Image: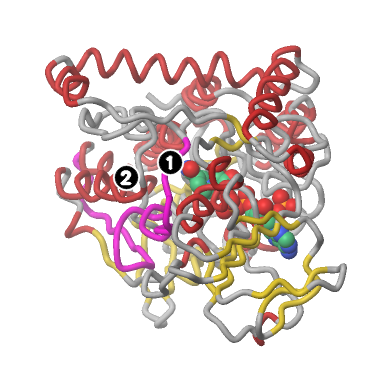
Amino acid sequence: MLVIGAGFSGVCAGIKLLEQGITNFRIFEKSQGVGGTWYENRYPGAACDVPSHFYCYSFEPNPDWSRVYSPQAEIQQYVEYCVDKYGLRDKITHGARIVELRLDEMAGNWRVTFGDDSVVTAHHVINGGGGLHKPHVPDFQGRETFSGPSMHTADWDHSVRLEDKRIAIIGSAASAIQVIPEVAKIAKQVTVFQRTPNYIAQRNDRTYTDRQRARFRRWPWLQRLYRWLIFNQMDVLLFPITRKNSLLGRAATRRVLKHMRDSVDEPALRKVFEPDYALGCKRILLSDDLWDAVNRDNVVVETESIERIVPNGIETADGVLHEADLIVYATGFDIDGHMRSINVIGMGELELQEVWSDAPEAFCGGCVAGFPNYWMITGPNTGVATTSVVYMVEQMVRFILRMIAAAGAEKLLSVRQGVQDAYNDELQTLIEQRVWSEGCNSWYVNESGRVTTLYPKNARAFRRQLERVNLSSFEVMEANAKKPTMQPEQVA
Ligand code: NAP
């Protein structure tokens, strides 16, 4: 058994495998530490925009979160803690980048090839690689000519001094709005290049007092109740705003826009931040400190499009040169490229990249027809807009381990093509009802205009859907034989 990645997904899979008494597995992680996205994203201001009491494993509540939305270092520390507590440290191999998974149908195994050409085999592969880790740096004309340092938010170089620098930040979304307030405090000048405005709601972050933390420690039920309340707030109250033209969505839009207008001092600047698309079509952002930064004298928001990068700065389409000493790319991630980053070759030499040439598609986001015993924890359409991804990860891991128990050490499980197709037809119909399909440009939508990232129902529905899946959805094959040898049966 092999697990890819030591972020929240891979660590959860490892913990649950050990809990079931399965010890013959290894976790391969490309970086030198655990934590996944929280290991990579160390830019100033990096924090979670989901409340920490819900952005953690349900089986490992942490009474000591310092604040509602914990900073990166604390989340990273939490993952480290889980790895040690559950005895996973020795199960992880670092610096191991997997480049190919090839099914050996006769042996019933996956041949797993690493970047250094070494090979291991595994009967089951659980892919816990997250979706947001392949930095996207747009190929601006002249990018290589810039004479100062430049870096992506997910690849922050803390040795670069920011004091008294003129900093150009390209992008104005989730990562950018966290980094801007921090760098604005020390930089000489910050120029933010905004292509599309975002809805930015109040985060209402605050610290937990010593007394509150002591109460969580003393009464675990209180912490469980608090988590349940956050879960329901997001799943029951917030999720409905993602329905197209909903009354709730319109009310929320008015509220968020009012807050934004009230927060920007300069009247002329207010319009710059007003989106012209429906709330939720792009990710709704949360911030308490962006507006203070925007109101500072040393912060400028530029909406002209970037024409080229030159040695001493950025030139916009109106011919203006914006001088800069440092360029920060807060330009997001290559979601599609990530999903295809490992060459996966399944039955009949079928390549996943080919199968996914139009759009990535899976059954329940966890498995693909023709790729038996290859399981994805955060596969296509498992992303969330209004809940905690850690919740989704736990549900998916439970589902995968149930399927693995059914397959055992001998059999291969491949989801039936018809089942997968029917699932995706329904999924896309449901997505049509959601604001993400309204046509705005976001990482939720791939190049062909299809929403391949988000799940169109709430988190509770995702859990129920996975619980209902049984072996009748799969072809069950013995190694050495491609024909189904078992009748579909219910998985206990
Ligand atoms: P993103 O949402 O994809 O935003 C990228 C930004 O770069 C956008 O403002 C985009 O403009 C801009 N951009 C991209 N290409 C550009 C180009 N060629 N020219 C000009 N501007 C360009 O990336 P992100 O902010 O890193 O966030 C990605 C996701 O990571 C979030 O949605 C969230 O799920 C996660 N995240 C979470 C947290 C957290 O608090 N938990 C924090 C950071 C990130 P357009 O909008 O016009 O495309």
Quarter of the figure with the C terminus:
top left
Tell me the magenta residue range: 21-49
Quarter of the figure with the N terminus:
bottom left
Residue displayed at 58% across by 58% down: 298
Q: Which residue is mark 1?
A: 48
- Type of amino acid under label 1: Cys
Which of the pair 348/205 is nearer the observer?
205
Can see residue 356?
Answer: no
Secondary structure beneath dot 1 equals: loop
Q: Is residue 143 magenta?
A: no
Mark seen at residue 59:
none
Mark seen at residue 75:
2
Say left or right for 346 vs 81.
right
Residue furthest left as drawn:
218
Mark 1 residue's CB less than 8 Å from ligand 1: yes
Which of the pair 299/490 is nearer the observer?
299
Q: Residues within 10 Å of mark 1 (few under 14, many from 20)?
A: some
Q: Is residue 32 magenta?
A: yes
Residue displayed at 73% across by 57% down: 302
Check the image and report above or below for 200 versus 4. above
Counting every numbered tag in the picture gives 2
Label 1, label 2: how far apart the Cα atoms are? 8 Å
Q: Position of residue 185 (x, y in %)?
A: 46, 55
Residue displayed at 62% across by 40% down: 381
Q: Residues within 10 Å of mark 2 (few under 14, many from 20)?
A: many
Query: Which is the main secondary structure of the residues drawn in magenta?
Result: loop
Check the image and report above or below for 296 versus 205. below
Q: Position of residue 168 (x, y in %)?
A: 61, 66
Quarter of the view holding residue 109: bottom left
If you read the primary sequence from the N terminus, does the residue marked by circle 1 or circle 2 appear first?
1
